[in-house]
């Protein structure tokens, strides 16, 4: 039985789903798009995301159009910024949305709900939000009182609130690598002399350094896997800090892993991880991408919670510290110092054991 104020999807022709957060957050919202499309085959679904995260949705079969907000607009002159905002609002108004689904705490959702005049709109029911926020939406979904709900389910709660229940098979993450991404991955694997399905993909970096495992431990894991005959491919974002971090790892290795750090687009990274026999990484967007591509995952978690952000995959292992009952604390390193003891002390043999369990299946 759904809520008494469930919406009638037969009266909905066009939906706007808003997710203004990071890459992994956008990817974890893709089941919402799938469920909407499956329950209303004639519905057109548009998405509004930050420009740098749009690749996560491009090619998604459930989506009609992807609209973007460029974070750089804030750095422009006031008139230029207003011009961009007004242009976007005009485009969204022209689409004539019947339903808006806002999947974050971003205040823009409340303004859009009012400016677009949607008959129905749903957003998180944050208790401390203003009356303006509360009155901006026709429906607000309840938030869990504990911290144990995975973000995929959290996103789907927006649909449950309006009477749409997801089946288990509809909850898969969707990421389309596309022809260009496939060509990228094939090119780099050929240059490295590595066959598809014959390598382990290690993405040790994160935009947040407090989520990363120490360089020496990464190098020890790489060498241990090389000793058992595995080919390793390392990747990272084209960010100076991440590239330097991976370079330090490689410099500590006795073996010679293939280093593709900074050389792949997001689509190329997706295609590459789809060709790997196993993905190893920390709490980061590439870990979620590996889940979407159906690659077995070993994920290392420190301060962040695996119950909310863990790999959304049937074939996975999550490795955490057993000697730090304070985790997950959600703090950016112990004391806010950007270094997490629960990761620094996580021994490589525990990670290797998890890797072996999946490789030996």
Image: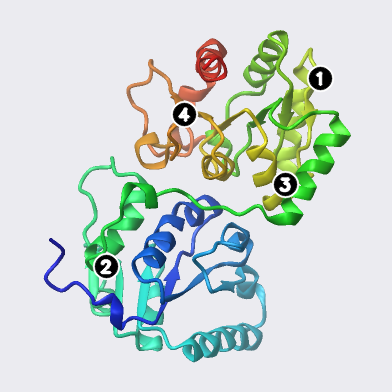
Relative to 92, is 31 above or below? Answer: above
Mark 4 or mark 1, which is nearer to you? 4
Mark 3 or mark 1, which is nearer to you? 1
| Residue under numbered circle 3 | 239
Residue at 36% from the left image edge and 42% from the top image edge: 308
Quarter of the image with the N terminus in it: bottom left
Residue at 50% from the left image edge and 85% from the top image edge: 92
Counting from the top left corner in percent of width and height, residue 109 is at 39, 74
Counting from the top left corner in percent of width and height, residue 86 is at 55, 89
Relative to 25, is 69 above or below? Answer: below
Relative to 78, is 133 above or below? Answer: above
Label annotation for residue 316: 4
**Location of residue 165 (image quadrant):** bottom left
**Location of residue 35 (image quadrant):** bottom left
**Location of residue 148 (image quadrant):** top left
Relative to residue 327, is residue 262 drawn left or right? right
**What is the C-alpha distance between the residues marked 4 and 3?**
28 Å
Local SS, label 3:
loop
Local SS, label 1:
loop
Label annotation for residue 256: 1
Marked residue nearer the N-terminal end (4 or 1): 1
| Residue under numbered circle 2 | 129
Marked residue nearer the N-terminal end (4 or 3): 3
Mark 4 or mark 3, which is nearer to you? 4
**What is the C-alpha distance between the residues marked 4 and 1?**
26 Å
Marked residue nearer the N-terminal end (3 or 2): 2
Counting from the top left corner in percent of width and height, residue 128 is at 24, 63
**What is the C-alpha distance between the residues marked 3 and 1?**
22 Å
Relative to 197, is 71 above or below? Answer: below
Asked if labels 1 and 4 touch by Cβ distance under 8 angstroms, the answer is no
């Amino acid at each position: 039985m759904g809520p008494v104020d469930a919406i009638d999807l037969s009266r909905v022709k066009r939906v706007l789903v808003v997710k203004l957060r990071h890459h992994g957050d956008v990817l974890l919202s893709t089941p919402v798009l799938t469920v909407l499309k499956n329950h209303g085959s004639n519905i057109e679904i548009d998405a509004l995301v930050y420009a740098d995260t749009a690749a996560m949705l491009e090619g998604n079969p459930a989506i009609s159009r992807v609209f973007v907000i460029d974070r750089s607009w804030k750095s422009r002159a006031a008139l230029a910024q207003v011009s961009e905002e007004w242009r976007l609002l005009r485009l969204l108004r022209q689409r004539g949305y019947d339903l808006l689904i806002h999947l974050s705490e971003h205040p823009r959702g409340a303004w859009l709900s009012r400016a677009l005049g949607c008959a129905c709109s749903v957003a998180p029911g944050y208790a401390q939000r203003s009356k303006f926020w509360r009155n901006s939406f026709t429906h607000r979904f309840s938030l869990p009182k504990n911290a144990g709900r995975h973000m995929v389910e959290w996103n789907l709660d927006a649909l449950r609130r309006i009477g749409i229940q997801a089946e288990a098979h509809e909850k898969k993450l969707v990421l389309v690598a596309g022809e260009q991404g496939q060509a990228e991955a094939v090119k780099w694997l050929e240059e490295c002399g590595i066959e598809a399905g014959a390598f382990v993909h290690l993405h040790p970096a994160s935009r947040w350094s407090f989520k990363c495992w120490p360089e020496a431990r990464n190098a020890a894991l790489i060498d241990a896997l090389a000793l058992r005959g595995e080919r390793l491919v390392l990747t990272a974002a084209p960010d100076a800090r991440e590239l330097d971090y991976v370079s330090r790892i490689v410099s500590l290795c006795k073996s010679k892993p293939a280093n593709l750090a900074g050389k792949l687009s997001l689509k190329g990274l997706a295609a590459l991880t789809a060709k790997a026999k196993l993905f190893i990484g920390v709490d980061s967007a590439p870990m979620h991408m590996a889940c979407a591509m159906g690659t077995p995952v070993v994920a290392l978690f420190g301060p962040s919670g695996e119950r909310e952000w863990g790999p959304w995959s049937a074939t996975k292992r999550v490795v955490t510290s057993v000697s730090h009952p304070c985790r997950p604390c959600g703090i950016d390193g112990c004391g806010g110092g950007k270094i997490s003891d629960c990761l620094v002390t996580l021994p490589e043999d525990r990670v290797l054991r998890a890797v072996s369990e999946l490789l030996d299946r």
